[in-house]
Image (tube, rainbow, N blue to C red):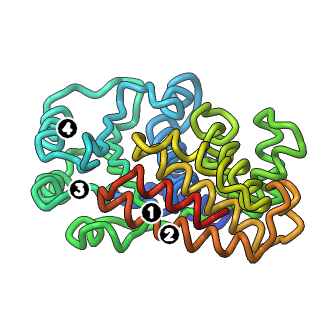
């Protein structure tokens, strides 16, 4: 299944060789920016580990539906992985029977940077004395954000974005029209998962479309329309952060390729740079729980 991961040829060759020779470490940390495919890579590796011959069970692993796979991820407003859940996983690993179809069992820890001190200590007890046949697959956006006690017990591998032309080809195979595939591959710089989410997820599509509208209003110096759009987010902190992120991607794209400004309402590079400064300031205020209504009003004035 590793061959389904886009790009990253050296990584796939190294992990594939480790699997074939039985030298795969029992704890693997896959590091990659959001949208690079670290989670998908983890599921591909798990499928090859549990079901070397492939088949329906391996496909179920890719879909997150296989019973031999246990999952830990952040919860609640803090996004942290609670120690209670780690202990529950430890019990499940140590006291449940393995399937006769699988070569072992896998515990996914998505977003290992969200392990706090208590949950990391509980996780260490499992990783340092692993039950036979258990593979720990951790993902993180940066190795530096993972606690050293956890990071030092893992073999780390980096998932890289793919070249934009390769990303566009993959998106076309997933059903995207050619021009849209090329645009999303360019805007998101080869982050396949992010591009697919912008195509498939309604909320992400809306945020991208509204970010484009805002770019157009900025190009036209239309503060009124910019404010009318932004007021939809004056009670939606998470939605506002998502919109700011999409604005950053579009403005960065215009700076990399000024001609792309025509797709963003005629946005020029100087205006794109101004928006990037304004979104950085707005993001700091929003993440600090500042006044959201005032923030969006100020943002409208700054970008348009």
Label 3, label 2: how far apart the Cα atoms are? 27 Å
Residue wearing tag 4: 89
Residue wearing tag 3: 115
Q: Nearer the viewer, mark 4 or mark 1?
A: 1
Residue wearing tag 1: 283
Asked whether residue 226 is in view, the answer is yes
Residue wearing tag 2: 280
Q: Are marks 2 and 4 in contact (CB under 8 Å)?
A: no
**In what element is the residue under mark 1?**
helix
Q: Are marks 3 and 2 in contact (CB under 8 Å)?
A: no
Residue drawn at (77%, 74%) of the image: 269
Q: Earlier in the sequence, mark 3 or mark 1?
A: 3
**In what element is the residue under mark 2?**
helix
Label 2, label 4: how far apart the Cα atoms are? 39 Å
Residue drawn at (18%, 58%) of the image: 116
Q: Nearer the viewer, mark 4 or mark 3?
A: 3
Q: Are marks 2 and 1 in contact (CB under 8 Å)?
A: yes
Position of residue 48 in the picture relative to residue 197 (left or right): left
Instruction: Find residue 85 and report its horizontal and vertical position in percent.
Output: 17, 39
Quadrant assignment for the N terminus: top right
Label 2, label 1: how far apart the Cα atoms are? 5 Å
């Amino acid at each position: 299944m590793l061959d389904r991961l886009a790009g990253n040829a050296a990584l796939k060759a190294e992990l594939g060789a480790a699997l074939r020779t039985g030298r795969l470490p029992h704890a693997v940390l896959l590091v990659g920016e959001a949208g690079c495919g670290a989670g998908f890579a983890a599921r591909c590796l798990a499928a090859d580990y549990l079901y070397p011959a492939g088949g329906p069970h391996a496909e179920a692993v890719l879909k997150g539906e296989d019973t031999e796979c246990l999952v830990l991820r952040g919860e609640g407003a803090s996004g942290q992985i609670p120690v209670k859940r780690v202990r529950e996983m430890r019990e499940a690993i140590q006291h449940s029977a393995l399937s006769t179809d699988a070569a072992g069992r896998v515990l996914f820890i998505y977003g290992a940077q969200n392990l706090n001190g208590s949950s990391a200590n509980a996780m260490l007890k499992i990783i340092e004395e692993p039950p036979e046949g258990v593979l720990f697959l951790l993902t993180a956006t940066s190795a530096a954000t993972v606690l050293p006690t956890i990071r030092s017990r893992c073999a780390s591998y980096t998932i890289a974005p793919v070249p934009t032309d390769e990303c566009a080809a993959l998106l076309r195979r997933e059903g995207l029209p050619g021009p849209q595939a090329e645009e999303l591959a360019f805007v998101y710089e080869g982050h396949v998962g992010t591009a697919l989410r912008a195509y498939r997820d309604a909320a992400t599509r809306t945020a991208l479309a509204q970010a484009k509208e805002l770019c157009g209003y900025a190009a036209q110096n239309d503060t009124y329309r910019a404010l009318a759009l932004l007021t939809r987010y004056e009670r939606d902190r998470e939605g506002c952060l998502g919109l700011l992120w999409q604005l950053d991607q579009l403005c960065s794209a215009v700076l990399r390729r000024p001609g792309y400004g025509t797709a963003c309402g005629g946005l020029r590079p100087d205006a794109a740079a101004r928006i990037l400064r304004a979104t950085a300031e707005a993001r700091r205020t929003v993440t600090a729980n500042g006044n959201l209504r005032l923030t969006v009003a100020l943002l409208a004035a700054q970008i348009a």
